[in-house]
Image (cartoon, helix red, strand yellow):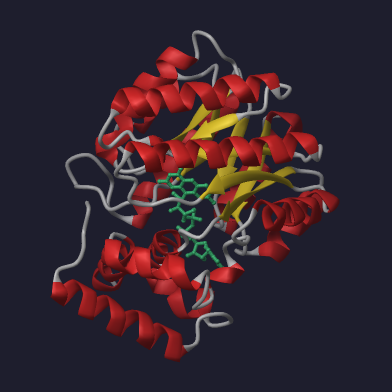
Amino acid sequence: MGLVKNFFIALSNNAFLNESAKKIGPSLGANRVVAGNTIDDVVKTIQRLNDKNIAATVDNLGEFVNSKQEAIAAKNDILKIMSAIHENGLDAHVSIKLSQLGAEFDRQLAYDNAYEIVQKAAEYNQMHINFDTEKYDSLSDITHTLDQLKTEFSNVGTVIQAYLFKADELLDKYPDLRLRLVKGAYKESPHIAYQTTEEIDANYLHLIEKRLLNAKNFTSIATHDHRIINHVKAFVEANNIDKSQFEFQMLYGFRSELAESIAKEGYNFTIYVPYGDDWFGYFMRRLAERPQNLALAFKEFVKPKSLAVIGVAGLVAILLGKSCKK
Ligand SMILES: Cc1cc2nc3c(=O)[nH]c(=O)nc-3n(C[C@H](O)[C@H](O)[C@H](O)COP(=O)(O)OP(=O)(O)OC[C@H]3O[C@@H](n4cnc5c(N)ncnc54)[C@H](O)[C@@H]3O)c2cc1C
């Protein structure tokens, strides 16, 4: 199973495949988990979710940002979607990645881009800006950026990855920020992160309970795991925690029926809506996330033929050595 996971992670990191995929647009089933290429596409998707009492957090997809020009283009795309959310009165906010704003080659540029986004969002009725967490080696950039921004703005927050040994410490550092709690999506070393499902789930539940009992700001519990969701429902009931204090989140296209039924029960719910032509890396990471349930999760939209195409293309690209940024 580790091999399958590593295979999809390798594909997600493959610059050649990511570039090629941009030209053909979301395919191989990715159009079921990516909301489209344009702002119009994403606005329509958010409107459909809002009609079901579900909010959105929007992610402008982007991989391999290696130049100032690309980082500024990404910032401008994010400003455009923020403007569309505001103009259309949508119940939505924005998730951003510092790497897309240039952090991997110019920290100051990424900070300046993030600052401009957060400042504009504050003008849009304090629209929330979430700093998604990525690989561990980029975590200190995120916390450093947040530490600076939070002295001036209240519309910023981030994500705590439960697989990290230092997740508890991060939770304690930010009781006053809006936080999203997740299990963690990247492959990390045993020196810094729990490796087994049991350990990660146990730490995830520990963090959720600690946060819900002590938070001074809103909490997003982002998982497709019904066992975690059911545990949270029972926990808040037993501890008289009001539903206004937290929400559940899921990714667009995953367990939609479950998401809608939870929203109908009166829980706050937000769907993470990715859009844009840079869909390949995001899609491969989703395939890597649950290799043990690959067939179950994707049989409705990934045909065996498509998987064969991905496999052959990936192997060819890897053998040709046209790859791996990180
Ligand atoms: C909204 C959102 C935002 C995120 N942001 C980040 C981030 O910023 N940084 C980061 O590192 N990670 C992020 N993640 C990814 C996260 O860290 C996990 O990798 C990912 O959510 C998979 O873990 P899980 O909790 O959903 O459940 P898993 O551990 O994948 O699954 C647990 C169990 O739930 C059930 N299940 C799960 N999915 C399905 C399905 N599709 N159909 C049927 N049953 C299913 C199965 O029984 C499975 O065994 C985010 C996830 C979400 C939902």
Among all residues in the image, which is located at the extreme right?
51
The x, y position of residue 186, in whole percent, is 33, 51
Q: Residue drawn at (50%, 81%), measured in percent from left and top?
A: 302
Q: Which of the pair 198/69 is nearer the observer?
A: 69
Residue 214 is at least partly visible in this image: no
Q: Which of the pair 164/77 is nearer the observer?
A: 77
**Looking at the picture, does residue 205 appear above or below residue 130?**
below
Determine which quarter of the picture holds residue 172.
top left
Is 305 left or right of 241, judged from the image as shown? left
Determine which quarter of the picture holds residue 155.
top right
Q: Quadrant of the N terminus?
A: bottom left
Q: Residue drawn at (76%, 56%), measured in percent from left and top?
A: 44
**Looking at the picture, does residue 70 appear above or below residue 38?**
above
Among all residues in the image, which is located at the extreme top?
151
Among all residues in the image, which is located at the extreme bottom?
305
Residue 13 is at least partly visible in this image: yes
The x, y position of residue 84, in whole percent, is 72, 40
